[in-house]
């Protein structure tokens, strides 16, 4: 490997602290080494590059973090959940200002730890800052709408959204900053307290932000612990004291964690899970556009996105032309290191992923599929070049499993009922992309697809953004909805003060409104 250019070089980071109860506590126990699948130039022998290390914390620390979050919520009496909305907003605004100077370092770590391209790494950081700023605006709007009384059947009601309690927040490795903060920040702003454990990869990049969290929030409101899910998340769930499990990851992990919670109805779930989003390419589609969108949909960040297109249904009338051009377009993609110019495909951060992808390819070939592109399946120790597999059918593993990596199954169809039935039978239901031009056909199709998934992308790839739009899914793809606005709802519950229209009650309400005895009862308009 060529030496990385100076602008992306990194000093090794040994981070020996964790954040519990407002203190950056020094850890004297075992450390976990953090490595990159971008190999070391010094040895040139496919040795992962050591980036540094973080504490490998245990159940004792996990339970201390839980206790700190519980104490900060203090059975609803805590400073944070009872604070004025404007004061909580100030804490979030302080945090985002302290976060901004870490842009370079966090983005470099995104490249090294998870192989994100340079552009995408900076984009992830900037998108996260934007998300936090938009969340503040959305919260102000929500508060303004609540700054009023309603009256029905002689009862005055002052309705607001209140926090739920302690949130255990677990993010994914593919968006270790953005997706995690899209859970954490709305949870906090609504008045919850939290324990946050970074993902299995993309851990070091959180460390430059711990000081900002410490400085911005009251003690115990945010607790950040490093370690294995089994050592940290399981003991916390087993106590039954978690009110919200906020997780972006795999449905199996979500189910395993829920199962450990002894008080199921106490636990609210906010989950973004796996998906198997299909593209349906109709015979009248604009071919060039369909190919361009399917390339970015299937292979942006090597297909490691929950929103990636994971299967392409191509109409038989169109098949030969589509397959030939699509296979050529895949082979034209540039593989390289995240900071190389024009690079699109980058090393896979999970050590075992190339073998897993190869396994899916071999299984499909064994059952009758062919690899359509010349480079498809070419292996290196940290990569497997994207293989375009055709024809794929339900006997093959790649048809059912969320590959979350560079392999593209193409399924031919002649009757639209074939993909529709397969989608209805699938365990997933996040999004779909439909490529076509005849509005009558598209209109009928949209009416059915709207009952199978939660976003229908017309002549474009699937994606989460803009973050202002609802991000959710059916079946094993999600629980709850995350958009800037919906996340505020997901992490809170409607609560209200009801007061019969009597002179005594009205006098009390008037006194409450004229004083600052209550932060809940307030019609102040937040600018
Ligand atoms: O991994 C799932 C992400 O939410 C996808 O987001 O569509 O913006 O890449 P994206």
Image (tube, rainbow, N blue to C red):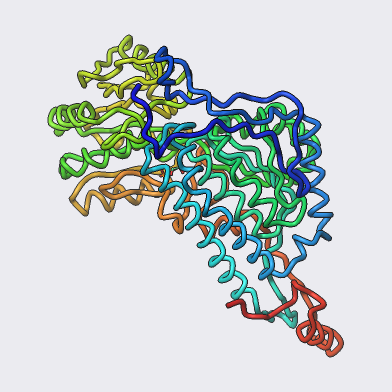
* Quarter of the rendering occupied by the N terminus: top left
Q: For the point 77% across and 30% down, which residue is it?
A: 59
* Quarter of the rendering occupied by the C terminus: bottom right
Q: In which quarter of the image is ligand 1?
A: top left
Question: Count of labels shown?
Answer: 0
Q: In the figure, 103 relative to 422: above or below? A: below
Q: In which quarter of the image is residue 224?
A: top right
Q: In the figure, 505 relative to 212: above or below? A: below
What is the x, y in percent for residue 463? Answer: 38, 46
What is the x, y in percent for residue 329? Answer: 19, 31
Q: For the point 12% across and 31% down, which residue is it?
A: 321
Q: Which of 45 and 410 is in front in this view?
A: 45
What is the x, y in percent for residue 38? Answer: 42, 25
Q: Which residue lies furthest to the top in this view?
A: 366
Q: In which quarter of the image is residue 237?
A: top right
Q: Does residue 122 appear in this view?
A: yes
């Amino acid at each position: 490997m060529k030496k990385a250019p100076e602008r992306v070089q990194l000093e090794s980071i040994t981070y020996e602290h964790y954040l519990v109860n407002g203190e950056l506590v020094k850890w004297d126990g075992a450390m976990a080494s953090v490595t990159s699948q971008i190999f070391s130039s010094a040895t040139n022998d496919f040795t992962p590059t050591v980036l540094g290390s973080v504490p490998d914390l245990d159940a004792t620390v996990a339970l201390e973090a839980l206790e700190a979050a519980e104490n900060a919520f203090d059975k609803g009496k805590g400073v944070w959940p009872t604070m004025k909305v404007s004061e909580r907003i100030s804490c979030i605004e302080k945090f985002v200002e302290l976060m901004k100077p870490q842009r370079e370092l966090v983005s470099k770590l995104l490249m090294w730890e998870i192989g994100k391209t340079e552009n995408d790494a900076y984009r992830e950081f900037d998108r996260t800052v934007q998300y936090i700023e938009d969340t503040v605006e959305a919260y102000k709007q929500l508060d303004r709408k609540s700054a009023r009384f309603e009256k029905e059947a002689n009862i005055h009601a002052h309705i607001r959204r209140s926090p739920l309690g302690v949130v255990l927040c677990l993010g994914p490795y593919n968006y270790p900053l953005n997706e995690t903060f899209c859970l954490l920040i709305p949870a906090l702003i609504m008045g919850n307290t939290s324990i946050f454990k970074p993902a299995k990869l993309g851990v070091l990049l959180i460390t430059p932000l711990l000081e900002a969290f410490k400085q911005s929030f009251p003690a115990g409101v945010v607790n950040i612990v490093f370690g294995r899910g089994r050592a940290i998340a399981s003991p916390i769930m087993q106590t039954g004291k978690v009110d919200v499990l906020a997780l972006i990851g795999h449905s199996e992990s979500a189910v395993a964690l829920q199962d450990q919670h002894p008080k199921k109805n106490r636990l609210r779930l906010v989950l973004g899970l796996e998906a198997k989003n299909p593209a349906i390419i109709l015979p009248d589609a604009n071919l060039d556009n369909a190919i361009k969108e399917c390339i970015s949909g299937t292979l942006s960040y090597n297909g490691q996105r929950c929103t990636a297109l994971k299967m392409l249904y191509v109409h038989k009338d169109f098949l030969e032309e589509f397959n030939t051009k699509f296979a050529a377009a895949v082979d034209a993609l540039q593989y390289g290191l995240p900071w190389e110019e024009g690079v699109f495909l980058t090393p896979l951060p999970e050590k075992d992923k190339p073998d897993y992808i190869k396994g899916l390819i071999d299984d499909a070939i064994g059952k009758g599929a062919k690899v359509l592109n010349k480079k498809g399946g070419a292996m290196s120790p940290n990569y497997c070049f994207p293989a375009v597999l055709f024809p794929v059918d339900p006997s093959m593993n790649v048809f059912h499993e969320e590959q979350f990596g560079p392999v593209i199954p193409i399924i031919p169809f002649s009757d639209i009922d074939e993909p529709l039935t397969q989608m209805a039978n699938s365990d997933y239901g996040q999004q779909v992309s439909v490529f076509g031009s005849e509005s009558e056909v598209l209109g009928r199709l949209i009416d059915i697809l709207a009952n199978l998934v939660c976003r229908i992308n017309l002549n474009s790839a699937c994606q989460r953004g803009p973050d202002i739009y609802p991000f959710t899914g059916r079946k094993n793809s999600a629980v709850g909805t995350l958009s800037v606005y919906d996340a505020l709802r997901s992490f809170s519950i409607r609560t209200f003060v009801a007061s019969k229209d009597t002179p005594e009650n009205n006098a009390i309400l008037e006194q409450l409104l004229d004083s600052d005895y209550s932060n809940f009862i307030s019609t102040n308009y937040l600018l």
